[in-house]
Image (tube, rainbow, N blue to C red):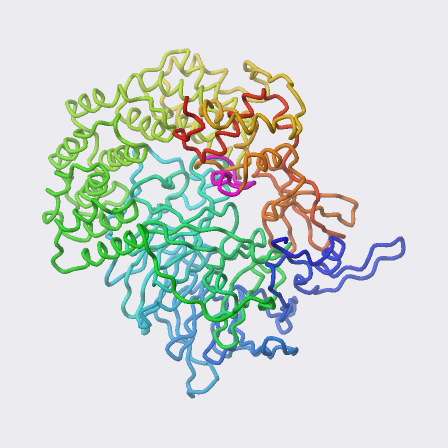
Amino acid sequence: MTRFRHCATGLALSAVLFALSPVSTAQPAKKPVDPPATDPATMKVAKGFKVELIFSVPQSSDPKKTMGSWVSMCADAKGRLIVSDQYGALYRVTVSPPGVKGVPAIEKIPAAIGSAQGLLWAFDSLYVVVNASKSGLYRVTSSKKDDTLDTVELLRAFEGGGGEHGPHAVLMNPDGKRLTVVCGNQTKITKFDTTKVAPVWGEDHLLPRVPDGNGFMKGVMGPGGAMYNVSPDGKNWELFSVGFRNQYDAAYNKAGDLFTYDADMEWDFNTPWYRPTRVCFVPPGSEFGWRNGAGKYPVFYPDTAPPVVNVGPGSPTGVCFGYGAKFPAKYQDAFFICDWSYGKLYATHLTPNGSTYKAELEEFVTGTPLPLTDIIINPVDGAMYFTIGGRKTKSGLYRVTYVGTESTEPSQPQPVGGDAGKQQELRKDIAAAGEAKQPEFKKIFEMMEGADRVGRMQARTALELHPKGDWHQLALNAQNPDVATQALLALVRVSASCPFHLKPGTPKPDPIVRAKVLDALARFDFAKLTDEQKLDVVRVYHVLFNRFGPPTADERKAWLAKYAPAFPDKNRFVNGELLQVFVYLQDEKAASIGMKLLKDAPTQEEQIEYARALRMLNTGWTPELRTGYFEWFVKAAAYKGGSSFGKFLKLIRDDAIVTLTPSEKTALKDLINADPATVKLPPEPARPFVKAYKLTDLTDALDKGLKSGRDYDRGRKLFAAGKCFACHRFDGEGGSNAPDLTGVAGRFSARDLLESILDPSKEVSDQYAAVEIRTTDDRVIAGRIVNLNADNVMVNTNMLDPGSAVTVDRKAIESMRPSKVSMMPTGLLDTFKEDEVLDLMAYVLSRGDRNNAAFKK
């Protein structure tokens, strides 16, 4: 049985979606001035569910006739909906019960307030988060204690809001006594009375960061977006979590754990610092590592919390859990997340995983266009409601009900057993121990021994909230590298400020602390550490040197003596982090090792990582190495990425030019000033045609050849040679215009995976399907809709160039239908020998684990 039901043909999609009459040779019918919102008949909906268009929001140039574009929503105590236009007023919407036809009653709320991106009915009041020129948290009440909401009270003004990354949602805290307020990264941290987050954050880049190529948020320091717990009167604020880019909304599960859906930076596509949109579990005191430009923390840093699941490119908007919905239990417990750009409403099925969670994504409702803005479960009628709109696009209000045969009885809490149950409780115990007035720090360190990664992060947060004199010796004496790195990181962060966050009168860092931390780290045999532990150790060095300054001559000598034999490492992420330290210390061997890594790197992301570090190196260069380095920029000019990609490369190159001596500038003048299009570099070796494979050609080899003896490194290089990294993300690198393949082994057999490579159009993922648009001037545009703005529809037509887009005027669209042809090209394996195909398959099926059985000799 198919997972989704297809409700309309492509022709019906275009006809209903744009309210156009069929094309004929006669005079075309006049288009309606205000076409209706997207028809549910054109959507793909999870089996057993029904979507209704409740109201198509009128738009007009006449202010008296328009209701704008709705972007936020809540339900009041009577089950009536309250919605807000992004740039205008609030409205109250009374809808007929599910199953009863009727036109909704809509009334404009008289209170002089609007432009809300967060709405909540609580404590007999309407709480409103305004994202406009007067951004802030407001409370709206009735002066007559009736249904007329006419009194507005400002509870807290926000500084720096007003843009799309400003203040967003407000929701009820599970304690029933407070609110939780969500702010994006253009909202400055507001004054707080208490905090779960130690205010010791910094930028903590060892080498100077590369700012955004287009200048977006250049100079804006971390920690980025934040969440707060707030008293109902708005007088007491607690900082709860930081480090987000632009999380629009959040929700609590039954266990009281907080979740959000954070945004990516699409201009970063195909760079090593790109982070996909992602679902995040938000523990108290957590930090998620947003920093401007190329400074975003990679997911493996020990001072940033990991995501629950990466979703891919998109624009996160409203979220909610399905609690209270008359849905099957699976969907009552789902975390629903809205993607504005690609028109996807996902049901995220969460499962405890150690002290955090893991998740499976299911496309619940999809449509084109379907710019989802907000979503709620109405506790009165048990239905789901969602809105579309934003940026003055056509807006609509929809209802989702279950019409299938499964039980819709309220779901029951499921006990969390096994290791996950123990780790969940341990994380909470660590948090509680850290909040005690006089914590037992020895006990916290003992708990860290049994905790997993997120649990240890919770412990570091607990340590940072208390005077270091109570626990610093425990940190310096820790023998377990997992415990020591988090504890030493805490010690470094509380002992010295990041240079970009220095406050007047801050004392200089004590070099004795730096020496003690270096001694503590030196006790670990780097070669015997796991990849994760190696990355943690190197990260502590990054933060230590950034905050305390460079080591003494003797400390530098000792560090180089210890780590020179370990560099390069087998792990490419370890190499990228270590190279930064060698460059920071201006080690003469960094140039030759770094250039070899750059030359051998199979992906543009890995190459950029090395090139970015080498740009700050002044020593150890030979004429040949310098020439090779600047030739790389000529080669990289042909690489593709997001909107800032080319300018990022230029900024890296400009920094490198500054390090040249006068004689080097003279010798490299022609190469530096050359037009990349005119420079002839040695051509890449062409791969000869081998065979146009069919599935039957490789079936026997798949059955026998993937059990052992495969080559991990060659598989990774072939993944790059086949252009897979250009579109697909895998093991933390690659593009995002196609599905992330890291977990594909858990969903597909080797045979199914190979068939999808050989015949990509046989079954096209709904999430990445293209559309075919025909316009009134006889143009045909095939690609993925990636953005909307008023009447402009932006379509990416080339997956290998994610920064390119064709703009189509919505009024000029004659028809639009799903494309039957995948955007993934065919013939990708035609130049591979059979052994190479097997190495590639083993690499993909290994989930990026070089210790997988397939690579055992």
Q: Is residue 761 visible?
A: yes
Locate the N terminus and report the quarter of the image it occupies: bottom right
Q: Position of residue 552 (x, y in %)?
A: 16, 26
Q: Nearer the viewer, residue 194 or 750?
A: 750
View extreme (right): residue: 26
Magenta portion: prevailing SS class: loop
Query: Is the residue 226 above or below the residue 537 in the image?
Result: below
Q: Which residues are magenta?
A: 733-747
Query: Is the residue 227 above or below the residue 549 in the image?
Result: below
Q: Is residue 132 visible?
A: no
Q: Residue at x 50, y 33 (%)?
A: 844
Q: Residue at x 70, y 45 (%)?
A: 819
Horizontal side, residue 200 vs residue 118: left or right? left
Q: Residue at x 54, y 74 (%)?
A: 91
In magenta segment, residue 259: no
Horizontal side, residue 581 vs residue 137: left or right? left
Q: Position of residue 253 (x, y in %)?
A: 39, 62
Q: How many marks?
A: 0
In the picture, residue 522 is in which quadrant?
Answer: top left
Locate the C terminus and report the quarter of the image it occupies: top left
In magenta segment, residue 734: yes
In the picture, residue 402 is in which quadrant?
Answer: bottom right
Query: Is the residue 682 above or below the residue 479 in the image?
Result: above
Q: Nearer the viewer, residue 755 or 283?
A: 755
Horizontal side, residue 170 vs residue 772: left or right? left
Q: Position of residue 753 (x, y in %)?
A: 57, 36
Q: Nearer the viewer, residue 836 or 244?
A: 836
Q: Position of residue 359 (x, y in %)?
A: 44, 51
